């Protein structure tokens, strides 16, 4: 898991919620990875937390989502003031 300092508590919580949601949508995304692959995926997600458009783009490139899953991700990301426009 990426390092978050004490001032980034909300961002850390969002990161954890997002990874959980992605795991629920597509568990295979995280299965069978070696440590460096896991770190790379988690770091890519963390690096995009401040920009929801790029984060959605990243998620869509990593895994296909159906309409219901897409709506769940939008709700999670848009309702969070850390990355809201």
Image (cartoon, grey):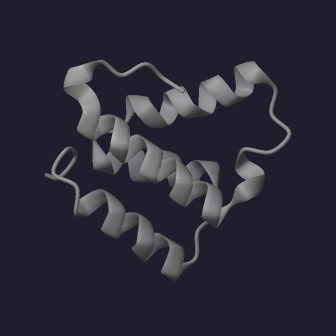
Q: At 68% from the left edge and 60% from the top edge, which residue is drawn?
A: 26
Residue 80 in percent (x, y) is at: 22, 55
Residue 12 in percent (x, y) is at: 35, 35
Residue 38 in percent (x, y) is at: 69, 30
Asked whether, in this view, residue 51 is left or right of residue 60, the answer is left
Look at the image and tell me whether residue 61 can be seen.
yes
Asked whether, in this view, residue 30 is left or right of residue 80, the answer is right
Above or below, 80 against 74 in this view is above
Q: At 54% from the left edge and 27% from the top edge, which residue is drawn?
A: 1
**Image quadrant assignment for residue 50:** top left
Residue farthest right in this picture? 32
Question: 56 and 24: which one is in front?
Answer: 24
Residue farthest front in this picture? 6
Question: 58 and 31: which one is in front?
Answer: 31
Question: 37 and 54: which one is in front?
Answer: 37
**Image quadrant assignment for residue 74:** bottom left
Q: At 47% from the left edge and 71% from the top edge, which residue is drawn?
A: 70
Q: At 61% from the left edge and 33% from the top edge, which residue is drawn?
A: 41
């Amino acid at each position: 898991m990426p390092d978050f300092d004490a001032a980034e508590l909300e961002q850390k919580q969002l990161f954890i919620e997002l990874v959980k949601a992605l795991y629920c949508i597509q568990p295979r995304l995280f299965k069978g990875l070696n440590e460096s692959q896991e770190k790379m995926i988690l770091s890519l997600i963390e690096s995009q937390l401040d920009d929801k458009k790029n984060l959605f783009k990243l998620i869509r490139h990593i895994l296909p989502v159906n309409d219901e899953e897409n709506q769940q991700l939008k709700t999670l990301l848009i309702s969070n003031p850390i990355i809201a426009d």
